[in-house]
């Protein structure tokens, strides 16, 4: 990766401060058969798992809060932390720790707890490796309202979603021009667009087949396709369930 900003070494970590939660980005949602209910209080969550990072492919695109992703800032994506909020992330292997501002949803890859910006991954020492085991600690800003401070007194230790072992039902339907694999349905076009962007990095080989389809003006469906045959769709589904460690079954 080249063309680093001249002042990249001087980019400061963000200072946690109270920010009103985003109106849309904190609603419950379903992705790849898993349901997520975002937390409404920062400073509660403590978890440990694998963190990845996202870089130039998503540089300049909108995050779930509508902000523009900058791979050279100290930010991160998380499935359930309040947006926006702040977290301390520590690399378990080398002990390095950074503070990031969480302003995006993801990752949706099984077993990963957070996506960090390229710069944050560099600071933690794992950008060249792609991923690392980290500890994530949601931070409570010192200027948070008293009601939020009281609610944050109940810490949460993250556990896998209750339906983590249930198969994802991925309907396949014969549409004009081929077969599609539906991966998610949203009432908000912005949420669908955000999911499509995040899913693109999990399904790089099929990213050019990801679309958002709105048939009834109510649901925005994120789909893979079209595929010319069922065999071609099955081949793509094999990559989803195998290489990307995502669960899926096919129904027609």
Image (spheres, helix red, strand yellow):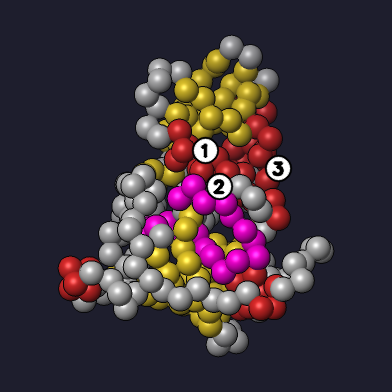
Q: Position of residue 155 (x, y in %)?
A: 26, 74
| Figure quadrant of residue 40 | bottom left
**What residue sits 46% from the left and 38% below the top?**
190
Q: Against 12, is 53 above or below? A: above
- Whether tag 2 and tag 3 are in contact, CB under 8 A, the answer is no
Residues 57 and 222: in front is: 57
Position in image of residue 187 (x %, y %): 37, 32
Q: Give the SS element for disc 3.
A: helix
* Mark closest to the chain's N terminus, 2 or 3: 2
Q: Which residue is mark 1?
A: 193
Secondary structure beneath label 1: helix
Callout 2 secondary element: loop
Let me know if residue 42 appears in the view. Answer: yes
> Which residue in the protein does label 3 denote?
205
Of the residues tagged 1 and 2, which is closer to the observer?
2
Q: Provide the residue designation for mark 2.
A: 62
- As for residue 110 lying within the magenta part, the answer is no
How far is disc 2 from disc 3 in space, using C-alphas? Answer: 22 Å
Residue at (46, 63) in percent of width and height: 102
What is the spatial separation of the Cα atoms under label 1 and label 2, in whole angstroms?
9 Å
Where is residue 33 shown, x and y percent of the image?
41, 43
Q: Nearer the viewer, mark 3 or mark 1?
A: 1
Q: Is residue 88 above or below residue 234?
A: below
120 vs 187, left or right, is right
Compared with 183, 144 (above or below) is: below
Percent across and percent down for residue 114 are: 50, 64
Marks 3 and 1: CB-CB under 8 Å?
A: no
Residue 70, numbered circle? none
Residue drawn at (59%, 21%) of the image: 179
The N terminus, quarter of image: bottom right
Q: CA distance from mark 3 to mark 1?
A: 18 Å
Q: Is residue 80 magenta?
A: yes
């Amino acid at each position: 990766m080249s063309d680093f900003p001249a002042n990249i070494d001087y980019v400061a970590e963000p200072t946690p401060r109270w920010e009103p939660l985003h109106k849309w980005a904190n609603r419950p949602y379903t992705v790849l058969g898993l349901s997520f209910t975002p937390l409404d209080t920062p400073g509660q969550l403590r978890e440990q798992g694998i963190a990845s990072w996202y870089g130039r492919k998503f540089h300049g695109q909108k995050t779930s809060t509508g902000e523009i992703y900058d791979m050279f800032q100290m930010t991160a994506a998380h499935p359930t932390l309040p947006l926006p909020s702040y977290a301390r992330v520590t690399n378990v292997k080398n002990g390095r720790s950074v503070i990031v501002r969480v302003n995006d949803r993801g990752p949706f890859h099984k077993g990963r707890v957070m996506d960090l910006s390229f710069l944050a991954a560099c600071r933690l020492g794992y950008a060249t490796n792609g991923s690392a085991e980290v500890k994530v600690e949601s931070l409570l800003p010192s200027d948070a309202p008293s009601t939020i401070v009281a609610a944050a007194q109940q810490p949460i230790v993250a556990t896998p979603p209750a339906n983590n072992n249930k198969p994802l039902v991925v309907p396949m339907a014969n549409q004009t021009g081929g077969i599609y694999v539906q991966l998610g349905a949203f009432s908000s076009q912005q949420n669908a667009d955000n999911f499509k962007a995040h899913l693109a990095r999990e399904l790089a080989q099929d990213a050019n087949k990801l679309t958002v389809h709105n048939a009834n003006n109510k649901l925005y469906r994120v789909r893979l396709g079209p595929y010319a045959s069922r065999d071609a769709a099955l081949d793509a589904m094999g990559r989803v369930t195998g290489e990307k460690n995502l669960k899926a079954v096919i129904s027609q």
